[in-house]
Structure formats: C-alpha cells, structure tokens
C-alpha cells in the first residue's frame, strides 16, 4: 500500500477507529511501541545509547582477528535511528559515532573490503547529510578533529579523507 492510499484510508476513519489502530500497532509491534514512546517522551540520549550498543556489538564481531561486522546490520541500525527524527545534530552524532567505532576497530581488527567500502560510504553520507541539514560546518570541523586526533590508523584517515574530498 502506498503512502497516498494509506492517507486516503486514514482520512475516512473516525477518531475512535484511528485510536484503535494506533493501540493495536503499539501492542503488536515493538518498533511501533518504541517509536510512540520516543514520540511522547523524546529522550535523544537514551535513544543514542540504545543504538550505540547495537553498533558496538556489531562492529566488534570478529573471528581470528578479522572483522565479521555485517554492513547490512550497521546500515539498518543507522536508518532506524534516523527514522525517529531526533534532529540533525543527533543524527550527525549517530553517524559520527558509527564512523568512530569503525575507525577504532580498524586499528586492531582486519577489516574486509565490504567494511572499508562502508567506511567510505558513511563518510560521504555524513557530508551529504550535514550539507542537506545546514550543519556542514559542524561536520567538517568534527571530521577534521577525527583525522588529526591520532587515534585512528593512517589508512583509516586516508580512506575517510579521500571519500570526503570527492
């Protein structure tokens, strides 16, 4: 069902019918419950911590010193976080957190080509998101601080630097 068709159906419903659907969705799906709880009581720090835990767990999946991080799981976590619409600064925090965790892990874990490609894509996504949401100056400053902090490998710094230079 398209969003337009859903909107049309919802407009034809009474207030009580809409309440019943919302309450049914709240009871039926954890995702709806989480969304409505955030909507009613937006605690961005708590939400950020929840997704940080998911990302840390995934980034540090290893076997014999090689990364087993699934990029699809990382992308899904970031996309879910953005779906809550916590605000541009919070989304930027989540994107930078993910990049930071990948960067610190890369120093000690052998990352495969898929993970390196995601680091490149994520770096570009940060710049694009920041530019689209009028927080580009914050993003540029934070990336500069990251690249000059000395806590990441030279390879990671080069990969991120090249991907944002495009």
Image (cartoon, rainbow, N blue to C red):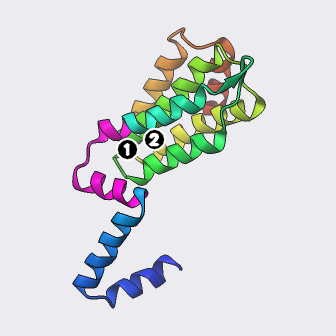
Q: Which stretch appears magenta?
A: 31-48
143 left or right, relative to 18: right
Could you tell me which secondary element the residue under label 1 belongs to? helix
Q: Does the CB distance between marks 1 and 2 fall below 8 Å? A: yes
| Image: 13 above or below 3 | below
Residue where numbered disc 1 is placed: 88
Q: Position of residue 78 (x, y in %)?
A: 50, 43
Q: Position of residue 32 (x, y in %)?
A: 38, 61
Of circles 1 and 2, the one toward us is 1
Q: Position of residue 62 (x, y in %)?
A: 68, 24
Residue 49 falls within the magenta-colored stretch: no
Which residue: 30% across, 70% down? 23
| Image: 78 above or below 9 | above
Question: In the drawing, what numbered circle is on residue 130?
Answer: 2
Q: Earlier in the sequence, mark 1 or mark 2?
A: 1
Relative depth, front residue between 23 and 52: 23
Q: Is residue 136 visible?
A: no
Residue 39 falls within the magenta-colored stretch: yes
94 left or right, relative to 27: right
Could you tell me which secondary element the residue under label 2 belongs to? helix
Q: Is residue 152 visible?
A: yes
Q: Quadrant of the C terminus?
A: top right
Which residue: 68% across, 17% down? 109
Which residue: 31% across, 37% down? 46
Question: In the drawing, what numbered circle is on residue 107?
Answer: none
């Amino acid at each position: 069902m398209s969003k337009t068709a859903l909107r049309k159906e919802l407009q034809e419903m009474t207030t009580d019918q809409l309440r019943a659907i919302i309450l049914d969705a709240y009871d039926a799906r954890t995702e709806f419950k989480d969304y409505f709880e955030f909507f009613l009581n937006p605690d961005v720090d708590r939400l950020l911590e929840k997704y940080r835990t998911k990302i840390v767990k995934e980034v540090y999946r290893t076997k014999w010193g090689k990364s087993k991080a699934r990029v699809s799981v990382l992308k899904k976590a970031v996309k879910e976080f953005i779906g809550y619409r916590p605000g541009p600064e919070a989304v930027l925090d989540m994107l930078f957190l993910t990049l930071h965790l990948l960067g610190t892990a890369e120093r000690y874990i052998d990352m495969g080509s898929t993970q390196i490609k995601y680091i490149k894509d994520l770096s570009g996504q940060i710049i694009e998101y920041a530019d689209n949401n009028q927080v580009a100056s914050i993003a540029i400053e934070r990336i500069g601080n990251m690249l000059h902090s000395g806590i990441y490998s030279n390879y990671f710094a080069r990969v991120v630097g090249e991907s944002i230079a495009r």
